[in-house]
Image: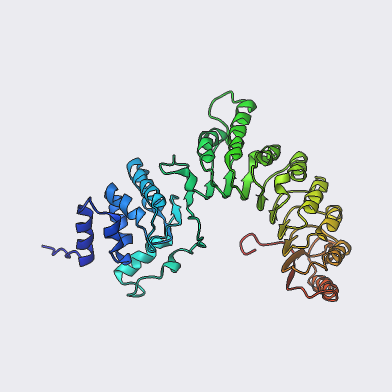
Amino acid sequence: MCAQTPPTLLKLARQALLRDETLDMSALDKLPMELLPALFKEALTGRHTMTVKAMVAAWPFPCLPVGALMKTPDLETLQAVLAGVDMELQRKIHSRRRKLQVLDLSKKHHEFWSIWAGAEKGDCSAEAPDEQQVVKVLPRYALRRLLKVVADLWLRPCFHAEHIETLELMMISWDMLKLSQVSPFLGWMRNLRKFFLANTIKNVFIIGNRTTDREENCIRKFISQFYKLDCLQYLSMNGIYFLRDHLHLVLGCLMAPLETLSITSCNLSQSDLNSLSECPKLFQLKHLDLKRVCLMDLDVKPLQILLENVADTLQSLDLESCWMMDSHLQLLISALSKCTQLANVSFYDNDFSMHNLTNLLQHTANLSKMNVEQYPAPLECHDELGYISIERFTQLCAEQIDRLRAIRQPKCISFATLICSRCG
C-alpha cells in the first residue's frame, strides 16, 4: 500500500472556505493575502461562482489575470468574474486593501500565478512576494477609479461598460464581419480615455460572392462608434489594414481633442495624410507617432501643417522608419523649429543627407526642452556598395554633435544605422 500525503493546513483551510458559499467580502478582507491566489484558482476551477464573485470584489492586488486560468471559456464563471468587478466598482466605500486596476482575460501565461505558487511551496523565499514584483502598479487617481480590461477575444460585458477607461483590442485574424459584431460594445464605453487597436489581418468572408460593399459597411459600422467616445484622449492604431482611405472617417468622429495619436505600421494614402491637417481635434496633440508609416511617395505638406498647428503643445514626435528622404525633411524643418515644447524626436531609419541633417539641427537648436534626439546616420556614411563605413559614420556623426554643442548642450542624442527590431 502507498501512503497518501496528508493535505497541508493551507489546503484544508481552502477547502473549508470553498464549502462556505455564503462567503462575503468582509470575511475575505480578514484573510491573509497570501492565501487568496491559491484559493481563487481552486474556486475558479471548481466553479464556485459565488466565491469567485466575492473574491473578485475583494481582490487586494492591482492585477487579476483570470484568463490564464480559464483553459476553456465558461460563461457562468466569466459572468461571476464580471459581476464581482461590477460589485466593487459600484461600492460607495472602498477598502484600502482593494486595488484591482487590471482585469486580464487573455489566455497568455502570467507570472502572477507562478510567483504565488512558488511562494506557497516555499520556493526561493519563505516570505510572500511583494505585489509590486507581480505586476506594475498603475498610477492612482484621487477622484476617479480606473479599470483596464485586456482580452484576446471580445466578450459581451456583464458589468457597466462606462467604468472602462482603457481598452486594448488585439484583433488577431479577425475579419471585418467579426469586427462589426463587436462594434456596439465599443459605443457603450462612454468614459473610454485610452483605446489601443492592434493587429487586424485582412480575411476573406467565407461567403462565396463577397462584395467590397459589405466589407465597407462593416468598416463604417465600427468607425461610427467613435462618435460615442466623448472622453477619448489617447488613440493608438497599429497594423490596421482597413485604415487606408478611412482615416478621415475616424478623425471626423472624434468628439474631444486628442492628446496622443499613434498610427504605426499602417499603409496610408495621400487622402489619409491630408486628413491630419484638416481635423481640429488634433490641434492640441502632445504626442504624435507615425512609426513605420511609409511616406516615400506621399506629399508631406499636410504633416507640415499639422506640426504648425500643434507647435505650442507637441512634446514628442516619432517618424522612425517612414521611408523619408531629403525632400520630405526640407518641408518639415521650418514647422519643427516652431515646436517649442518638443522634448523627444526620432527620425531613425530614414534617408537624409549630411547637409539636411545639419540644417535640421541648426533649426531646432533653440528648442530648450529637447531631451531625447534620435537621427539616422547621414547617407554619406555609406560606401559605393551601400554598406556603412564605420570610419565615415564616426567622423560625420561626431561633426554633427560638435555643431549642435556649439549652440546648446544636447542631453541625449544618438545617430544610428538600421535599427534592430528586437533590441531597438
- Is residue 76 rendered to the left or right of residue 399? left
Please give the count of numbered marks on the rendered protein.
0
Towards the viewer: 337 or 268: 337
Work out whether 210 lies above or below 262. above
Work out whether 203 lies above or below 32. above
- Is residue 17 rendered to the left or right of residue 334? left
| Quadrant (top left, top right, bottom left, bottom right) of the C terminus | bottom right
Residue 179 appears at what percent x and percent y?
54, 37
Q: Which residue lies furthest to the left in this view?
A: 1
Residue 337 appears at what percent x and percent y?
83, 61
Q: Quadrant of residue 291?
A: bottom right
Please name the residue shown 28% across and 48% down the image. Answer: 50
Please name the residue shown 47% across and 53% down the image. Answer: 147
Towards the viewer: 389 or 229: 229
Towards the viewer: 131 or 216: 131
Q: Which residue lies furthest to the top in this view?
A: 209
Q: Can residue 74 be seen in this view?
A: yes
Colour scheme in use: rainbow
Q: Quadrant of residue 98?
A: bottom left
Q: Is residue 47 visible?
A: no
| Quadrant (top left, top right, bottom left, bottom right) of the N terminus | bottom left
- Is residue 274 rendered to the left or right of residue 14? right
